[in-house]
Image (cartoon, grey):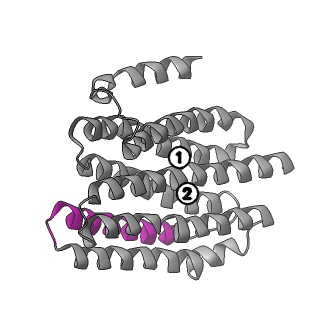
Amino acid sequence: MKFLLILGSVIALPSFAAGGGDLDASDYTGVSFWLVTAALLASTVFFFIERDRVAAKWKTSLTVSGLVTGIAFWHYLYMRGVWVETGESPTVFRYIDWLLTVPLLICEFYLILAAATNVAGSLFKKLLVGSLVMLVFGYMGEAGIMAAWPAFIIGCLAWFYMIYELWAGEGKSACNTASPAVQSAYNTMMYIIIIGWAIYPLGYFTGYLMGDGGSALNLNLIYNLADFVNKILFGLIIWHVAVKESSNA
């Protein structure tokens, strides 16, 4: 009950940012902002409540999952207001969100392994650096600080580096000593990083490298889809393995 009261007060704080006039039913990008906002709120409540169902070693992982969706929910309240009021991409809000949530998502790989087996702390450092490089150059390309193509290439190289570390580097070595349930969750998370995260460069490409007139529409619709898949589904995988491993303990 206390958590729900706190959550209610937090939701009320940025209500002015969620105004912005009427939502046009034909504005599919605007509708996607509202859908993702609601889904992120529901996921946040779910992850924090479900912490009581899992063993102590898994609670941090679920907490991080709740923080990811909670931080994203907060920023979506503002982003959807910007879109409805102006029709412009809320680039700064989105990258502030990603600057917090993407490292936390990457941290989940380390946490899920640390809860089940021994894993070197250097893995977390490598993933953190890779995620920050990816985000910094992505923002520079979108904000016009740097040419779009070079920023896109450097960001993708950082993404490929993280995939390598998780798929064939230290992450995979640690995963091989974990339980079958953890290995299955890890591999599923890897596919999200490879396939789900590929939605982001697709959005960047359509928004900044194709040069069509509806770039803002395409960019934000694709980004919203990517956030829905990657942040919520990622957390649900963590929750699934945490509940399964806790019930077998």
> Above or below — where is 63 with respect to 223?
above
- Left or right: 47 as drawn, with respect to 129: right
Residue 71 visible at all:
no
Q: Which residue is mark 1?
A: 64
| Mark seen at residue 108 | 2
Q: Residue furthest left?
A: 145
Tell me whether circle 2 and circle 1 mark residues in contact (CB < 8 Å): yes
Residue 149 found in image quarter: bottom left
Q: Position of residue 130 (x, y in %)?
A: 39, 71
Question: Which image quadrant: the N terminus?
Answer: top right
Where's residue 96, x and y in %?
A: 30, 49
* Residue ID at (43%, 38%): 73
Helix, strand or loop status at disc 1: helix
Left or right of 233? Residue 91 is left
User: Quick check: 8 left or right of 134?
Assistant: right
Q: Nearer the viewer, residue 35 or 24?
A: 24
Taking depth in this image into account, of 136 and 225 the one nearest to the observer is 225
Residue reaching furthest front?
Answer: 26
Element on which disc 2 rests: helix
What residue sits 41% from the left and 57% below the top? 222
Q: Of the residues shown, which amino acid type is indicated by label 1? A: Val
Dominant SS type (magenta): helix
Magenta stretch contains residue 249? no
**Highlighted range, magenta:** 121-146
89 or 49, nearer to the observer: 89
Say what amino acid the circle numbered 2 marks.
Glu
Q: Give residue 128's quadrant in the image.
A: bottom left
Sequence order check, earlier mark of 2 and 1: 1
- Say the numbered circle drawn on residue 136: none
Q: Can the viewer see residue 39 in this picture?
A: yes
